[in-house]
Image: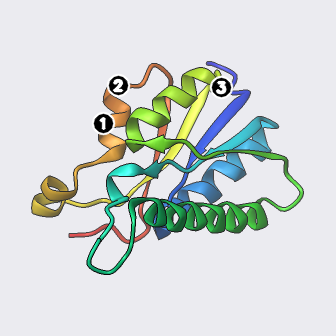
């Protein structure tokens, strides 16, 4: 059985992500593993609106502030545990896999919303795409209250 020494915890601003982060932090403590968190700023969400004066850059600033707030929330959950932080911009599953490789992670921990049916079809699944193309083990923590 592999010894996990470097855990990468993928986070976003969802409740299921925070639950997965707690599971990842607990596991990292048990394993005494080096731990980092990654929040990918999804550039597909940086759509400006010229009618309201909101530029693409303004939208990016808002998304980065959201990421920082999530990092702070997870740092509070971690207590005195040392956590590295990464905030790449791009497509979430692609950036997760790139960073996991770059950082030489042994395990990627992430949550899933648990969408099914049309919601899954419309929203897609970052977890599913990540698992399909990962070259490292991926621990997917289900949402506490999966969606129907």
Residue sticking out furthest to the left: 118
CB under 8 Å between callouts 3 and 2? no
Crowding near pointer 2: few (<14 within 10 Å), some, many (20+)?
A: few
Q: Quadrant of residue 108?
A: top right
Q: How many marks?
A: 3
SS assignment at label 1: helix
Q: Say if mark 3 contacts mark 1, CB within 8 Å.
A: no
Residue at position x 67%, y 60% from top?
71
Query: Crowding near pointer 1: few (<14 within 10 Å), some, many (20+)?
Result: some
In depth, the one of 134 and 55 nearer the eye is 55
Secondary structure under the numbered disc 3 in the rendered image: loop
Q: Nearer the viewer, mark 3 or mark 2?
A: 3
What is the C-alpha distance between the residues marked 3 and 1? Answer: 20 Å
Give the residue at mark 3.
Answer: 103
What residue sits right under mark 2 in the picture? 133
**Tag 2 and tag 1, C-beta contact below 8 Å:** yes
Farthest residue, direction bottom: 52
Q: Nearer the viewer, residue 109 or 84?
A: 84
Q: Is residue 109 above or below residue 137?
A: below
Quarter in which the C terminus is drawn = bottom left
Identify the mark at residue 129; answer none if there is no mark: 1
Instruction: Give 31 or 132, whichever is nearer the viewer.
Output: 132
């Amino acid at each position: 059985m592999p010894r996990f020494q470097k855990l990468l915890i993928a986070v976003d601003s969802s409740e299921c992500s925070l639950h997965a982060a707690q599971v990842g932090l607990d596991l990292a403590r048990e394993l005494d593993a080096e731990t980092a968190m990654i929040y990918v700023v999804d550039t597909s969400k940086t759509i400006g609106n010229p009618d309201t004066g909101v530029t693409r850059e303004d939208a990016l600033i808002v998304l980065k502030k959201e990421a920082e707030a999530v990092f702070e929330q997870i740092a509070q959950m971690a207590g005195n545990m040392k956590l590295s932080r990464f905030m790449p911009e791009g497509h979430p599953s692609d950036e997760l896999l790139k960073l996991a490789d770059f950082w030489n992670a042994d395990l990627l921990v992430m949550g899933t919303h648990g969408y099914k049916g049309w919601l899954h079809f419309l929203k897609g699944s970052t977890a599913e795409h990540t698992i399909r193309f990962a070259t490292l083990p991926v621990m997917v923590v289900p949402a506490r209250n999966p969606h129907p």
